[in-house]
Image: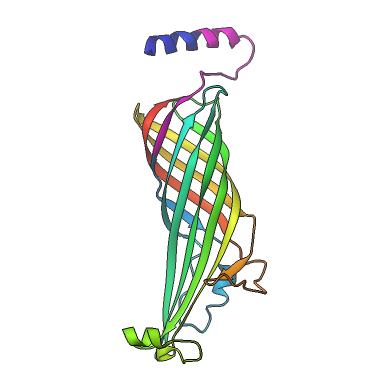
């Protein structure tokens, strides 16, 4: 196989050497899947504006750690095209204390879907691929306040019309949406069966409808409170790689 690859490469290069400087190589092929340590970078500025007075720090503009997985296979009948799937999720939390009250604000982001990518034919030894993710995601924001400890009976006593135990409350709002995310990934094989990945994308949420945990719509959500945003991923893939 190695000798055949070398022979075909020489034939192709000789055939175009007197026509142009751009080089063409055999189409990449293979399949793989692996773990994706990632970093999600939403726009926290409209949320941070609401944290003043709660005793918490702002959510970092640099984003937060997330994990996920992905896999793909080259389809073969279209040179350079590979299809697969990807999923990423993570959360970050800020905690503060004002007087006797402890406040927690937790931001969760999860998304995933079908992937389609085209591997550019101008690079040797690595796969530089551009494409998109088409799928869905959920972003949730949980805000809670508590004073002291809870007991089993306190929780069940919080019936309609009863005062919350310890003057505490919890709200969980979420946005479930369809999404599309343009992506670019670089896969570097370190062995025929192992490849390293670094990539990035930008998730575009196609809906900005937010609901409480009982599926009641939250009205008057500012337009700048949006799901999605930049994400960066790295990973180790196991499979078979020939770029």
Quadrant (top left/top right/bottom left/bottom right) for the C terminus: top left
Residue 136 image position (x, y, % from top left): 56, 52
| Of residues 170 and 185, the one drawn nearer to the viewer in this rendering | 170
Quadrant of the rendered image containing residue 35? top left
Residue 225 image position (x, y, % from top left): 61, 67
Q: Residue at horizontal 60%, vertical 17%?
A: 21
Quadrant (top left/top right/bottom left/bottom right) for the N terminus: top left
Quadrant of the rendered image containing residue 106? bottom left
Q: Residue at horizontal 46%, vertical 35%?
A: 72
| Of residues 52 and 1, the one drawn nearer to the viewer in this rendering | 1
Residue 94 image position (x, y, % from top left): 43, 73
Q: Residue at horizontal 46%, vertical 87%?
A: 159
| Of residues 187 and 168, the one drawn nearer to the viewer in this rendering | 168
Is residue 205 shown in magenta? no
Relative to 131, does residue 66 appear above or below in the rendering? below
Q: Residue at horizontal 67%, vertical 67%?
A: 223
Residue segment shown in magenta? 11-33
């Amino acid at each position: 196989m190695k000798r055949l690859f070398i022979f075909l490469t020489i034939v192709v290069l000789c055939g175009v050497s007197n026509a142009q400087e751009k080089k063409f190589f055999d189409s990449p092929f293979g399949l793989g899947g692996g773990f994706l340590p990632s970093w999600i970078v939403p726009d926290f500025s409209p949320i941070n504006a609401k944290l003043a007075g709660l005793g918490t720090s702002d959510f970092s503009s640099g984003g937060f750690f997330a994990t996920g997985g992905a896999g793909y296979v080259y389809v073969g009948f279209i040179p350079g095209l590979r299809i697969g799937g990807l999923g990423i999720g993570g959360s970050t939390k800020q905690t503060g204390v004002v007087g006797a009250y402890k406040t927690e604000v937790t931001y969760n982001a999860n998304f995933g879907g079908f992937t389609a990518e085209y591997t550019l034919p101008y690079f040797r030894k690595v796969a530089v691929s551009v494409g998109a993710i088409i799928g869905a995601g959920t972003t949730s924001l949980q805000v809670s306040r508590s004073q002291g400890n809870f007991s089993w009976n306190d929780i069940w006593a919080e019936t309609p019309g009863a005062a919350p135990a310890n003057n505490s409350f919890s709200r969980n709002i979420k946005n479930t949406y369809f999404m599309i995310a343009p992506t670019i990934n670089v896969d570097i094989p370190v062995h025929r069966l192992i490849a390293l990945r670094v990539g990035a994308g930008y998730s575009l949420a196609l809906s900005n409808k937010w609901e409480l945990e009982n599926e009641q719509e939250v009205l008057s959500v500012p337009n700048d409170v949006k799901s999605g945003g930049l994400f960066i991923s790295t990973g180790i893939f196991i499979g078979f790689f020939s770029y």
